[in-house]
Image: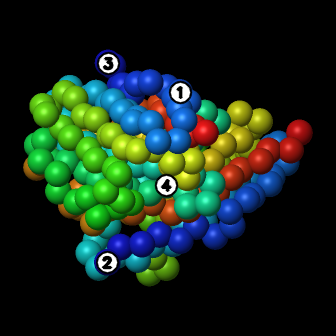
Amino acid sequence: AQSVTQLGSHVSVSEGALVLLRCNYSSSVPPYLFWYVQYPNQGLQLLLKYTTGATLVKGINGFEAEFKKSETSFHLTKPSAHMSDAAEYFCAVSDRGNQFYFGTGTSLTVIP
Amino acid sequence: DAGVIQSPRHEVTEMGQEVTLRCKPISGHNSLFWYRQTMMRGLELLIYFNNNVPIDDSGMPEDRFSAKMPNASFSTLKIQPSEPRDSAVYFCASNRRGTGAYNEQFFGPGTRLTVL
């Protein structure tokens, strides 16, 4: 069975500070891993994904995530937060079938 | 490229009325998903189709909910009768399942449903 845990439903950072959003997964098979972002009143947009190959994945808007199999983690980072990064972020795991399992989301607030 | 299209974007209705939400997936995608998002429950998968056939509807909350996909370019989610607790944002997503496809899901903008 697959599942995702996002630690921290709310994260606040100062503008220019490091962003770290945590995601741990459980999967019985090698997973595909995704981060999505949802801006207010919008649908979910893909930020980045890990499927195979390099474990450090770069996405849009300066975000990146590292797949760590030993830690079953896929944390999302950005070196310097921008006001426009304020949004809801969802981690998701796929069992390489067609089912996605989403985390409960982390709301990111950026303080000027 | 047109993304996933949903209509209407907003729907306000009274309890007991029938509500129909519509979705047009991305051309060439063969799987379609309906999700519901609320503050209390987060993002829930209601049902998904593969090649127009419902594969998993275990997330459909009650018999009041039904979904159809008559062809590859159109799906509906119907609630009859609607209740205030159905108020939520309903998302449609699609992807291409098959060899070489990494099954990334593409989401529509959602329909915000308010049942009074």
Q: Give how far apart the Cα atoms at labels 2 and 3 are.
A: 35 Å
Tell me which amino acid carries mark 4: Leu
* Pointer 3 residue: B1
Q: Evaluate if marks 1 and 3 touch, with contact meaning CB atoms under 8 Å apart.
A: no
Crowd band around label 3 with a 10 angstrom C-alpha radius: few (<14), some (14–19), many (20+): few
Mark nearer the viewer, 1 or 4: 1
Query: In the rendered structure, the residue with mark 2 lies on which chain?
Result: A
Q: Give how far apart the Cα atoms at labels 1 and 3 are.
A: 23 Å
Tell me which amino acid carries mark 3: Asp
Which type of secondary structure does the marked residue at label 3 adopt? loop
Q: Where is residue A66 in the image (x, y as percent from the top left)?
A: 49, 61
Mark nearer the viewer, 2 or 3: 2
Q: Give how far apart the Cα atoms at labels 2 and 4 are.
A: 18 Å
Precedes in sequence: disc 4 or disc 3: 3
* Pointer 1 residue: B10
* Pointer 4 residue: B43
Tell me which amino acid carries mark 2: Ala
Mark nearer the viewer, 2 or 1: 1
Give left or right: position of B91 versus A96: right
Quarter of the image containing the N terminus of chain A?
Answer: bottom left
Image quadrant assignment for residue A15:
top right
Tags 2 and 3 both on a single chain: no
Query: In the rendered structure, the residue with mark 4 lies on which chain?
Result: B
Residue furthest to the front: B16
Give left or right: position of A83 versus B102: right
Q: Evaluate if marks 1 and 4 touch, with contact meaning CB atoms under 8 Å apart.
A: no
Residue furthest to the top: B1
Q: Give how far apart the Cα atoms at labels 1 and 4 are.
A: 18 Å
Precedes in sequence: disc 1 or disc 4: 1
